[in-house]
Amino acid sequence: MIFLRRFWAAMARQISTILALAAYENDRKSTSSSVGSWESLINPLQIMLFFIGIRIGFRYLLSGGSLGGSATSLYFNIVIFMAAGFTIYFPFRQLAIQALSGLKLRSPLYYKRIEPLDILLALSINNIRALLTLTLGLMALIWALTWDFRMDSPGLALCIYLLTVVMAIGFGICLVFLGSYNKFITRLIKRLINRILIFTSGLFFATFELPLYSRPFVTWNPLLHAVELFRYSLNNEYPIPDISLSYLIWCALILLGFSLILYRTNESLLLESVDD
Amino acid sequence: MPESNQRSNTFSNTPKKLSSSFKFAESFESNQLITLWRERLASFAKPRILISAFLATSAFYCFVIGRDRYTSVSEFVIQQAAPLDGSSASVLAGAASSPQVLTSLVDGQYLQVYLESSDIKNRLFPDGKKFEQAYRPRLPDLWTGLDANSSAPAQLDFYRKQLSVAPQPMSGAVILTTSGFTPKQAFDLNAALLKQSRRFVNEVNQSINADQNKFAKKEVQLAELNLKAASRKLELFRKKHGNLSVESEKAATSSFISGLESQLVELKVEEAALRRQYRDPNAPEVSFVADQVKELQVQIRQERDKSVSNDGRDLNTLVLEEAGLISDVEFATETLQSARLASDNSRRESQRQLKFVVVLSQPGLPVAPDQNWRWQAFLASVGIIVVSWGVGGFILNAMRKS
């Protein structure tokens, strides 16, 4: 009982520390930009709209001048389809790259209780809050325009989102230590992440649209599983062949466990900045 | 105590003072009560306590008082008797582009709308009162179920929530899931909907084929009647004009006139020779041949007039009329042949395109309640907290800073 009380107190203190750091980073960020805290919304929104434009443009060209006809349109509005992908993909990308770039926010480290991982988690919270706001705003807009609200498995959606965050933190920390041996590898990984992840994470396509023989080339990516399962949680009729929740859970847990071990042994590496 | 003494003294002084001080004491007490409740409420109205209360209420409803829900699932495919021709449209396309799958998928989508329609609801539950009775709310969960005296749209909405029809673009199969508050409800609804699906495919698709066949047969009958009428007309025409064929009659007349004309030429040659032979043109030998020539000329003119004039046989008009009638018969014959061919093709195609509901997985009687909804609902409550904290916190912070 005493152990539980101490554990709970320690957890509460840790959470308070991370939240305080998040608030500090928010304050700092809001003063460094002319649009204040809204900047963390504007940048991802630009990228998201750009990709949605590309997707709609391709659909328009391929279907010979009409926006319909895609198999995914049976289940989703195109903007909801893309936004669901971004909800998962963007936090992952941001968190992984953030960890790989090293921590820019170092002043809180003056306090003994604060550790680099706390700062990383605080930054992640801020990113996730901004992206969550963006996604919810877009979905609310589409739902308001089409008057077609659908969220078949909200519990699954929450689990998928949390698993993605866990996986992103684990993946980011693992990459930091992988790249610590060679700076070139870090730069290469950082660039490859953007390109490989964006084309294999199912942002632009649905797995069921792919022919059977080409699926193994993308289903290795746990992020694809997260994106597809998130879409499935919005609409349970959405088909998800070769997609598995257990694979996602295993990937998230293994990456997190492995990253925590690496973090324990090489904590200082997180402070080294690797800028392109 | 001294305060009470003072009060009793005051009471004994004047009745006016007594009533005013009583009022003051009453308002003071009520103010104290309000303040006390405010303090109590303020101590409860902390975010942590409110969130805990919300989650506890949600967990209590989801895992304690929420009614059991049972789910029954069946899977079927709408299959054609013979596969369609053609292959996948694109190498980059998935299995969904296979014509067989696409046909089944489209049929599945029609079926989805059909099964969720008000028509089917009324067919399965003709009596609204009985429907309300079967799905009425029960203690302790008074939130779930169909209220008594509910409107028709509310009943239809509730009915739609009890079933899910999901056509699969990969295989073309249709997954039919039904839920109910008892295992029997879920199973019965699934079985009834499966029956309605069969009826839809049999009655709608097969009746289209039957209609096509009927139309083709009707066309054949019509063509036969046309041919009979055209043949009869031709026959009557020939009967009326007393010949087998006007064309051959005309040919015979022409050859007869030609024969007369050649005979006339011969006689004219003979006459010319006799005129050279005899000096007197009125010699009996010459006159005899000349008379023959004249007679023959008259005869030829008469024959000609007889065959083409309106008063005579008028063979030209008859030939034209007969040609029209013959072409009518020929056209009717060809039409009959085409109609027979089309009818035969239609019969063969309708056999080939006949669709059937092939049940891949029969619905089963659920043995245990479905726990999925409990977890989904509870996690949704957690999600609401997380999203409110994330989004609300971000927006409030951003607004404050800007």
Image: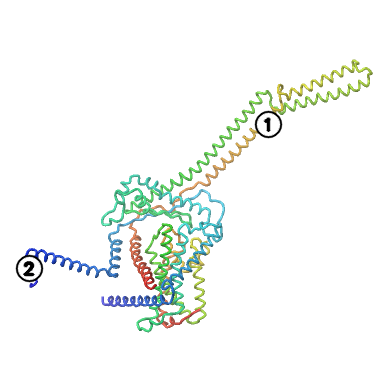
User: Do the residues bearing badges 1 and 2 touch, measured as CB atoms within 8 Å?
Assistant: no
Report the label total: 2
Q: Which residue is mark 1?
A: B323
Q: Quadrant of the N terminus of chain A?
A: bottom left
Q: Is residue B102 left or right of residue A117?
A: right
- Regarding residue B327, the answer to whether it shows in the image is yes
Depicted A162 relative to depicted B94: above or below: below
Q: Mark on residue B341?
A: none
Callout 2: 10 Å neighbours few (<14), some, many (20+)? some
Q: Position of residue B212 (x, y in %)?
A: 52, 41
- Say whether disc 1 or disc 2 marks the residue closer to the N-terminus: 2
Say which chain tag 1 marks: B
Residue plotted at (56% across, 51% down): B85
Depicted A51 relative to depicted A104: above or below: above
Q: Position of residue A139 (x, y in %)?
A: 42, 62
Q: Nearer the viewer, mark 1 or mark 2?
A: 2
Q: Secondary structure at mark 1?
A: helix
- Regarding residue A121, the answer to whether it shows in the image is no
Q: Amino acid at mark 1?
A: Ala
Depicted B337 relative to depicted B308: above or below: below
Q: Nearer the viewer, residue A150 or B207?
A: A150
Q: Secondary structure at mark 2?
A: helix
Q: Nearer the viewer, residue A160 or A51?
A: A51
Q: Amino acid at mark 2?
A: Thr
Callout 1: 10 Å neighbours few (<14), some, many (20+)? some
Q: Mark on residue B10?
A: 2
